[in-house]
Amino acid sequence: MKFFEAVRLAFHTIRVQKLKSFFTALGVCIGVMFLITVVSIVEGMGKYMENELVGKLIAINSFELRHRPSINVGDVSRETWLEYNRRPRILESDVEPVVAALPTDALWAMYSNGSIQVESSFGKPRSAQVTAFDGQYLEIKKLGVTSGRSFSQVDISTGTSVVVIGPDLAKRLFPDLNAVDRQVKIGGRYYTVIGVGESLGSAFGMSFDNYVYAPFRSPVHRLLNPGAHQIDGMIVQVATAEALPDAQEAVRGVMRARHQLRPAQKDNFVLETSDTALEFWNKIKSYLVLAGIALPAIGLVVGAIVIMNIMLVAVAERTHEIGIRKALGAKRRDILLQFMIEASTLSTFGAAMGIALGALGAYAIRTLTPMPTYVAPWSIVVGVLIGAGVGIISGVYPASRASLLDPVTALRQE
Amino acid sequence: MTNNLEEVPMTTTAERQAVLTAANTAPDKDWVIVTRGLCREYDMGGEIVRALRGVDLAIRRNEYVAIMGPSGSGKSTLMNTIGCLDTPNSGEYWLNGQKASEMKDDQLARVRNKEIGFVFQTFNLLPRATALANVELPLVYAGVPSAERHARAKEALERVQLDKRMGHRPNELSGGQRQRVAIARALVNRPSILLADEPTGNLDSTTSEEIMRVFEELANQGQTVIMVTHEPDIAAHARRVVVLRDGVIASDDRRENFTAKLGL
């Protein structure tokens, strides 16, 4: 029998046995639908992370010099943590030699940051992410102001008591008021708000707009780093991605020399790039994808069992038909082909429906909830492959049983 | 018995004896079926049932043979073996000069498709397919392209005067019509033998006569026909009657002698 004939025969049987076919396809459809939807959520979050969050929070072609990582990938052991705490801090005095080693067109800044309570006379006190910086921090972060002004050269060099605050913080501390030129109180001292910065957005309900920027030499620095001349880190931005490794090596050389490390000793500081943050995210994502595949996989296994069961019943109730076909010259291969094509056609159809419904589900989630979703092309391919695969695998056993039937016994069965 | 079987040739006992004694040699192509010492045993839950205990049978092209016997005589097993649906435990089976007793599953399937046309007591038509589709079935497995299949199936239905009902499903046809569809299906691949197992077992006497006339006509046209039955009056339509008893051939004679013995 030709392949085309087997396909035609399978379609005929599917048409004739509508209800059975419907339930078979449904099993696969639900599994694939879950696969597509769950993967679209994971992928959507991934895209969001890569395009919005990381891009916004970590500037391109930049790296940070810190004494320990700000982002930890995976579990950090107690030993590692203790080692981090033993490390020498980065000092204000490290900045000048580091800057000297950088290419002249590089931007740089030093900073200290932390979470501190900020008060005003108009609203409730609020904890904010306070950063005291020197250098081109805001240029590197590409953070402008929406009202008021940004820091002047004089503000930075003399350390005047002025701040730029984030839009969320402005709204909380000065409800229905213009925050510019009003006073905020940090650590018992007053600072004048000179501008309200641009919004950085939010992720998963966490706002990035509760920030305060102040000059490094303003009194706020003492609240962030009590130790004399200690800083939390430096940020360096070079002109091109190609220049990044060289700049990192230059900084590494300077810091190793300043920390008097022997060649065998490991760095006791870190150089973090946006890749580090992405790596962190990818780690989380791999768990999510795993969950996103494990959950629908259960659905698909159930679907496979349903198909196998239905096909086994089909073989049992069509034993006589198989007997007739064998008597008329059907080979084992012909019977095998007939049942396999039937099963895989149904499951491919189910998979196609599942993809359509899954994509629809992803669209619904995107429009009805704040969750970003993205239907990944690979998940469609995987959906079709798994759907058809489930059909073929669950069709193999019943089909091989059917093909091995003895024609005389099969014919006797009514 | 108004039919004229004089043109249908029949082998003589001597001719058959010559073929049957030449063990392990391929018979002349003219001998469609030659079995030598055919044995078939079944294991029925620990109990060995010996259905065939050494059957020697030779049938030449264009013969019209009835195989008779009471139930349990082994005639169904013989028919299944001749039809390549079953394989013997020992003995030789030569079909068209080919040793079918040593064939593998797929070869047997091919032989069933090309050489044998089955007609069953219960018709064994596919209930959800039309008469035409049922008749086309052997051609599907033979790999005949669809246009040629239609034409040949139609032609076969014409031969049994059912071309007007080819769009009907089996449940829309009478018993006699169903059996004629089955005959058309058996003939469509131009098999060397037409093998009928109790072809009138599910039919009333008028319809049985009608089906017997179809067989006689086919035999007259030169088709080799082998029919298994337990009814002597049906067996009496054949040119030659083989009687099976307890798994061996009890008698193998011309119809005239058989009917005379029974007083028909």
Image (cartoon, coloured by chain):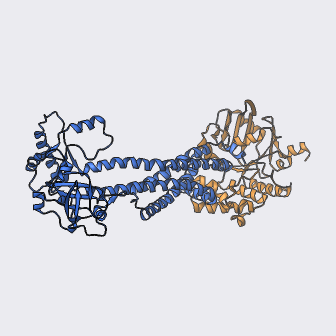
Residue A248, percent from left and from top: 16, 47
Above-or-below relation of A241 to A196: above
Residue A370 located left or right of residue A31:
left
Residue A232, percent from left and from top: 19, 47
Above-or-below relation of A260 to B206: above
Q: Nearer the viewer, residue B97 or A48?
A: A48
Q: Colour of chain A?
A: blue
Q: Colour of chain B?
A: orange
What residue do we see at 77% from left, 54% from top? B215
Judge whether residue B228 can be spotted in this image: yes
Residue A364 located left or right of residue A10:
left
What residue do we see at 32% from left, 50% from top? A281
Q: Nearer the viewer, residue A195 or A245?
A: A195
Residue B2, percent from left and from top: 85, 56
Residue B210, percent from left and from top: 81, 58
Q: Quadrant of the N terminus of chain B?
A: bottom right
Q: Quadrant of residue A21?
A: bottom right
Q: Residue reaching furthest right?
A: B263
Q: Nearer the viewer, residue A354 or A410?
A: A354
Residue A19 located left or right of residue A279:
right
What residue do we see at 61% from left, 57% from top? A13
What residue do we see at 59% from left, 52% from top? B142
Q: Nearer the viewer, residue A346 or B236?
A: A346
Residue A207 located left or right of residue A67:
right
Judge whether residue A9 can be spotted in this image: no
